[in-house]
Image (tube, helix red, strand yellow):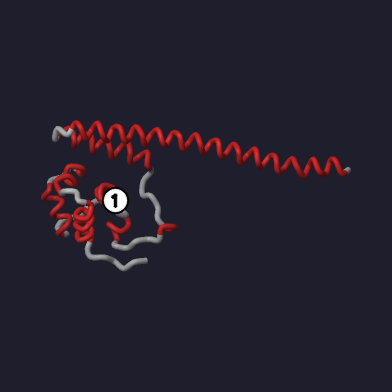
Amino acid sequence: MEPVHGTKGDRIKEAIKKSGLKQTYIATALDVTEGTIVNYIKGRRDISDESLRIIAELTKVSFEWLKTGVLKPANEAHVPYSTQTFTYEMFTDVFSQLQKVGKFAEIGLIGGLIARFNALLIENERLQSELNALKMQNSETQTEEPNKARATSA
C-alpha cells in the first residue's frame, strides 16, 4: 500500500485540479455552493462519503484514495456502489443540476451515454447467461461421458 497523501482536502483539491474540472462544476454536481467545496478542501467542513464518491467518479480517482489517502492493490479494490445504482441516482442528480443551469446539450450527451451504457449492461447479462448455459452443458457432457464409458465396458 502507498503512504497517506496529505489531508482529505488536499486530495480533493489535487483530484479536481488534475481532472481539469472546475470547482463550480463539482459544486453543481454535488448541489452545493462553490464555497462549500472550498470548505471541504480547507478542512473546515466534513464531506459525506456519498459526496466523496461523486467527486471520485467525476475526477476519475479512487474513492478509497480520496477518503483515506491509501491506494489498495487492484486485486483488493472494490466498487463502492453498483453501476445500476450509480447510473440511476447519480445521473438523475446531474441531469437536474444541468437543467437548472441550462446545459441542455450536455443533458443530451449524458443521456446518450447512459442509453449506451444500459445497452452494454443488457448485452453483458445476455452473454453471461449464454456462458452459464454453455458451462452447464459442458458439465453435463463431462458427467455423461464417464457413464457412457462404464456402460460400454460392462
Residue drawn at x 15%, y 49% is: 23
The quadrant of the image that shows the C terminus is: top right
Using the image as rendered, state which of residue 61 and residue 6 is in the foreground. 61
- Percent position (x, y) of residue 134? 60, 38
Quarter location, residue 71: bottom left
Instruction: Say whether residue 17 is left or right of residue 88.
Output: left
Disc 1 element:
loop
What amino acid is at disc 1?
Lys
**Could you classify mark 1 by the number of other residues whose Cα lies within 10 Å: few (under 14), some (14-19), or many (20 or more)?**
few
- Percent position (x, y) of residue 53? 28, 49
Instruction: Say whether residue 84 is left or right of residue 16.
Output: right
Residue drawn at x 51%, y 39% is: 128
Quarter location, residue 85: top left
Q: In this view, does 16 lie above or below 105?
A: below
- Percent position (x, y) of residue 70? 32, 63
Residue drawn at x 12%, y 48% is: 34
- Percent position (x, y) of residue 74? 41, 58
**Residue farthest to the bottom, as pictured:** 3
- List the residue tagged with mark 1: 60
